[in-house]
Image: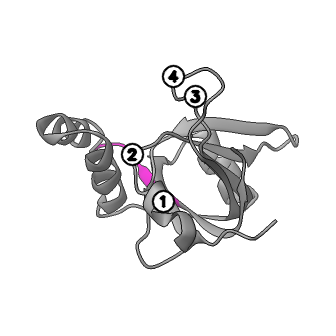
Amino acid sequence: MSSISFDDIREYLRQPLIARMGTIDDDGTPHIVPLWYVVEENRDEIVIMTDSKTRKTRNAAARSQGAIQIGGDPTGTPNQYTPGYLLQGEFVVAPDADRAALKRITRHYVPGEQAEALIAQWSADDIVEIRLRVTKIVKVM
């Protein structure tokens, strides 16, 4: 089996797909959540934004190893699925002080005024960005 590079799938990952982020709780239990993301253009990183008080934020800050799975969803035709990839690596949690991640990700998934309304709604929240620095990619579908 050949290895997959980030550049091999970068274009696919640029689509506004729903990702699933996997972190590990304090007791060792996996915590999996669906979320929005964007791809960094010049780095092998996936960026998400979330409230600083979420479990995924606490888990990623406490235990940096984790994964994000993208794709592998049903196409609507029986037994057919979209390409799917498991991206493994290290999470880095940082403030989103200028709201750049919040704005970029929201505008990637939601059109025009609707995006701006969500950005305004979340303006008082303590938003952080979580980056997955990808070290390994596994094709899952």
Look at the image and tell me in which quarter the N terminus lies: bottom right
| Residue identifier under label 2 | 16
Q: CA distance from mark 3 to mark 4?
A: 6 Å
Q: Nearer the viewer, mark 3 or mark 2?
A: 3
| Residue farthest toward the right in the current orientation of the protein | 28
- What span is in magenta? 124-130
Q: Nearer the viewer, mark 1 or mark 3?
A: 3
Q: CA distance from mark 3 to mark 2?
A: 16 Å
Q: Residue visible at 64% across and 51% down? A: 68
Q: Give coordinates of residue 133: x percent, y percent.
A: 61, 69
Q: Amino acid at mark 1?
A: Val
Q: Tell me which label, 3 or 2, sits earlier in the chain.
A: 2
**Vertically, is 30 above or below 41?**
above
Contact between marks 1 and 2 (CB within 8 A): the answer is no
| Residue identifier under label 1 | 47
| Mark 2, secondary structure of its residue | loop
| Residue identifier under label 3 | 74
56 vs 100, left or right, is right
Contact between marks 2 and 4 (CB within 8 A): the answer is no
Q: Tell me which label, 1 or 3, sits earlier in the chain.
A: 1
Local packing at callout 1 (Cα closer than 10 Å; few below 14, some 14-19, many 20+) is: many
Q: Amino acid at mark 4?
A: Gly
Q: Which mark is residue 76?
A: 4
Q: Tell me which label, 4 or 1, sits earlier in the chain.
A: 1
Q: CA distance from mark 1 to mark 3?
A: 24 Å
